[in-house]
Amino acid sequence: MTDSQKSDETAADLTEATAPVAARADADQATAEQATVGETVAQEDVDQEGVAAQAEGDEAVAVVEESAAVEAPAPAPVPAPAPRPAPSPAAFAARPKPAAAAPAAAPAPVASATSLAEAARWGRVEGDGHVFLTIDGDEHPVGQYPGVSNDEALAYFARKYDDIVAQVLLLEQRISSKAPSTDMQKTVSHLREQLAERNMVGDLRSAEARLDAVSAQITELEKAEKAEHDAVRASELAAREAIVAEAEEISGQDPAQIQWKTSSARMNELFESWKTAQKSGIRLGRSNEDALWKRFRAARTVFDRHRRAYFSQLDSTNSAAKSAKEKLITEAEALSSSTDWGFAAGEYRRLMDEWKASPRASRKDDDALWARFRAAQDVFFTHRQSANEEIDQEYAANLTVKEALLVEANAILPVKDLAAAKKALQSVRDRWEEAGKVPRADMGRIEAALRKVEDAVSHAEEENWQRSNPETKARTNSALSQLEAAISGLQDDLAKAENAGDERKIKGAREALEARQAWLDQIQRSASELS
């Protein structure tokens, strides 16, 4: 194989490794210089998948270098997206442009972040594009980029290093912005592997040191994320515990005292809160979630069992209450046509007392039953009211007579002659009974007015008896005798004090004498009234 044939074969293999770039250039029909091909390959290496593809391409370049020396077959080319093989860089550069189409602008070369001078510190090119990396004082072969200038070959492998640095920078920015740390360490490991392949030119030790720092920062970020996750998990666990505790509190209430409507609504709200937390909340671990769910489910089961038992008993109680009240209604409806007003009214009072003592049925049934019971009462009392109104019309004349008798009775007052007053009152009473009944509305007023006159006459009679009572007179006479004797003794004491000139005793005797004299005057007046 001639040197020319080897060169063409090497260029073809390199083009297959960078087939996506060539295919895109072919689609645009742009003039692709060899340096542009290298820069485009570097651009394709930015994302993680591109890096892997480029690594395979670099392996192909290394194999090409060896094949040039030992004429060994080249490795299988990297599959290109285009179905046809891409032309070699030299053939693609010599390909004529279509006459009818205007030349498309070639993409501007991407400037390497690492300058050629900087790249030259860490690598060199010799021979037909062979590139070497200097690291820790030792040189390592990186690969070959034949058919281009030394600067272009060096810049191509420097851009591979720049790609690694760009990804490190991206990681640093993600850490700085507190982005999720998921897969960051995996990316660091992948970048370390790429650096270890020594297929680029640049300050690899600096990049490795930056990766070490990034890895430590990712560890701290992971710790912070774990602490935050633990705090959120603890908060979620406390919230879920609160749901369960409240459900257990509700289910633990006395079924006879619980407010079922309010408690049922709250239990449903707790269940909805549980479902929402289970669906969108943070995971608590299978053991925690299973334990909490068992407690919550048990509380709901107990609550539902108590509720069913309560309402079953309530239905039984309502049924018994309904039967008892329907019996009372039957009696009330039977009395509604009675004209024995006094007896029927008493029976209705009895039925009403039994109704109040009966347990309540359901609200709907109880309202309907009460309406029937009240309707039967209304029928009776309406009939009685009509009958009373007819009677009142008949008694209107009796009212006129009794009102005249009241005028006559009031003329007795005040009582001056007890015997005459008693005689006049008895006459009024006799005619009062003969007059008969008055309308019910006036009965209380008329009777109260006559009773006032009767009380006045009775009071006068009581006073007269007290005055004529022999025992009272005897007690009065005895008191008079005692006071008269006491007054006589006090008069003697006063005379002695005056003769002695003792002012203190004179004053005391006079005060005692005046008091006894006042009592004597009062008793003498009472005695005169009794006589």
Image (cartoon, grey):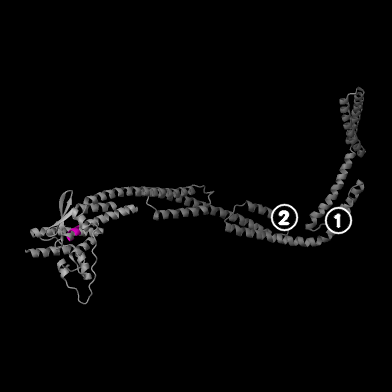
> What is the three-letter code of the residue carrying label 2?
Phe
Judge left or right: residue 496 versus residue 286. Answer: right
State the extent of the magenta-drawn residues as a range.
Answer: 152-157
Please, what is the three-letter code of the amino acid marked with disc 1?
Answer: Glu
Q: Write down the quadrant of residue 77 in the picture.
A: bottom left
Identified at 8% across, 58% down, the residue is 70
Magenta stretch secondary structure, dominant:
helix
Q: Which mark is residue 343?
A: 2
Rendered image: mark on residue 352:
none
* Residue labelled with disc 1: 434
What kind of element bears circle 2? helix
Q: As rendered, which of 166 and 250 lies closer to the eye?
A: 166
- The answer to whether 478 is drawn above or below residue 238 in the figure is above
Residue 26 in percent (x, y) is at: 20, 69
Residue 258 location (% of width, % of height): 53, 50
**Quarter of image, res 525:** top right
In the rendered structure, does residue 33 fall within the stretch colored magenta?
no
